[in-house]
Amino acid sequence: MLEVGQIAPTFKKPANNGQTINLEDYRGKNVVLYFYPKDSTPGCTTEACDFRDYHAEFATLNTVVLGVSPDSVTSHDKFIAKHELPFPLLADEDHSVAEAYGVWVLKKMYGREYMGIERSTFILDTEGKIAQIYPKVKVKDHVQQVVAYIKEHLV
């Protein structure tokens, strides 16, 4: 399991609009890396829209937001267009990034077991180190919690 203070696992993944996101390109900025289960589901939509609504504030804090799910680039493009999301969503279809961050886990719903993403957020500092980890995120007030942490510890 990853711990605060470790260098964050790097990756290069396809994202919306034909982009390829390389985590190392964001050195010098704080990064909010949030993992979510699925585009266009209620909790994931609320979380994405909350990050959208705080986008300008994150920018003033030298912070970028990157969302990660196992959905395809096509799915991300539709999700972004529908909700006017101003940040990249990475297509982790092979769940290699989720596995590297320890958030690809066995889940249970309605008595059925399956592998999926545990909603989690990692805050990375300007040197690429993990500054904070929020496992098993509850969506309500989560983005405000992330902003407060960055203001208090990374600015």
Image (cartoon, helix red, strand yellow):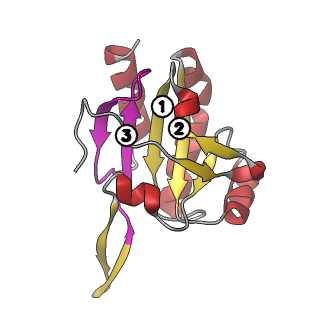
Examine the rendering and report whether any part of residue 19 can be seen.
yes
Residue 31, disc: 1
Q: Between disc 3 and disc 1, whose residue precedes?
A: 1
Q: Is residue 128 above or below residue 42?
A: above
Q: Is residue 45 above or below residue 3?
A: below
Classify mark 1: helix, strand or loop: strand
Mark whose residue sits in front, 3 or 2: 2
Residue 23, disc: 2
Give the alpha-carbon distance from disc 1 to disc 2, as whole Å.
Answer: 9 Å
Give the alpha-carbon distance from disc 3 to disc 2, as whole Å.
Answer: 13 Å
Q: Between disc 3 and disc 2, whose residue precedes?
A: 2
Mark whose residue sits in front, 1 or 2: 2
- At 39% from the left and 24% from the top, the residue drawn is 125
- At 58% from the left and 45% from the top, the residue drawn is 49
Whether the magenta-drawn stretch holds residue 128 is answered as yes
Quadrant in the picture for residue 146: top left
Q: Amino acid at mark 2?
A: Leu
Q: Position of residue 14 (x, y in %)?
A: 65, 53
Q: Position of residue 84 (x, y in %)?
A: 72, 45
Nearest the viewer among 23 and 62 is: 23
Residues under numbered marks 1 and 2 in contact, where contact means CB atoms less than 8 Å apart: yes
Task: Residue under label 3, please give it.
Answer: 122
- The span shown in magenta is 116-138
- At 62% from the left and 43% from the top, the residue drawn is 21
Classify mark 3: helix, strand or loop: strand
Give neighbour class at mark 2: few <14, some 14-19, many 20+ (Cα, 10 Å): some
